[in-house]
Image (cartoon, rainbow, N blue to C red):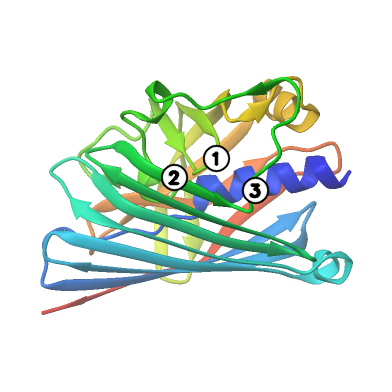
Amino acid sequence: MAWRVGSAALLALSLSLSTPVASRAAQTEHQTDYTISLAGLPIARASFHTVFTDDRYSISGKLNSAGLADILSSTSGQTSVSGTIERDKLSATDYSVRYKSGKKSRAIDVSFVNGNVTSATLRPQRRTPKNWIPVTEADMRNVVDPLSGLIFPADAKVCPKTLPVFDGESRMDFKLSAKGSKPFKTDGFSGDVIVCGVKFVPRSGYKKGRSDVEYLKRLEDMEIWFAKAEAGNVYAPVYVRVPTKYGPVTVWATRFKGDERS
């Protein structure tokens, strides 16, 4: 149970840990809070703060386990990304993650130039198991980080779209397919959201035949919902659903608020 729920939660989190930034105002700050649940029971909470100034953006976030998951194994993490605002996308320059679960910890740092990875470090280094599919130089070209890769300008097509994601260790595609719209309401937002189906396609940086990867690869009914942040004039995730045999892992935005300042 642990590996499947944990992998699904991490996938759901990577699909939603992004918050909107603004178009070119003097400064816009945006706060998004998420609750992460398994079969309706809370297992983690996450909070993200975005600041946009002129042509640059920065996102900082934190995650903490909650409920039964916190009793079984306390988990916490911090992540950040910074970069530049381009006409049709956010382009990261630096991305980092600090993660601790029980006695295990991990640190990831990635640098980008024009969508290409120039350096990636993982501490402690993972022992390379048998059947490991290594990440090649070609795999680290024209990629996005898991945070800013899921923010879209308001006039861009949100889905269908394929997102080539590199998270510092693994290279994967998130294939988004259009599934219409639905109403959504939370603190700071009320209206229709764009609903996308998600297909997870592993590319490299994982063990071939690993059961959790194979499980996620077979899923056909994952979803991610995008809401429009009016102040930022962008779309960002407010809901993610990843089925597991123990019930769905869901990520729900409990707050989606922006503050534009001159």
CA distance separating discs 2 and 3: 20 Å
> Would residue 113 be found to the left or right of residue 68 on screen?
left
| N-terminal label among 2 and 3 | 3
The spot of residue 138 in percent (x, y) is 38, 21
The residue mark sitting in front, 1 or 2, is: 2
> Would residue 118 be found to the left or right of residue 1 on screen?
left
| x 22%, y 39%: residue | 114
Asked if residue 117 shows in the view, the reply is yes
* Amino acid type at image mark 1: Glu
Q: In the displayed structure, would residue 144 be above or below residue 65?
A: above
> Would residue 164 be found to the left or right of residue 170 on screen?
left
Which of the numbered marks, if any, corresponds to residue 10? 3
How crowded pointer 3 is (Cα within 10 Å; few <14, some 14-19, many 20+) is rated as few
CA distance separating discs 3 and 1: 14 Å
| x 70%, y 42%: residue | 8
Which of the numbered marks, if any, corresponds to residue 120? 2
CA distance separating discs 1 and 2: 8 Å
Task: Name the image quarter holding the N terminus.
Answer: top right
Marks 1 and 2 in Cβ contact (< 8 Å)? yes
| x 33%, y 28%: residue | 141
Q: In the displayed structure, would residue 41 be above or below residue 91?
A: below
* Amino acid type at image mark 2: Ala
The spot of residue 180 in percent (x, y) is 44, 32
Q: Which residue is mark 1?
A: 169
Q: In front: 208, or 42?
A: 208
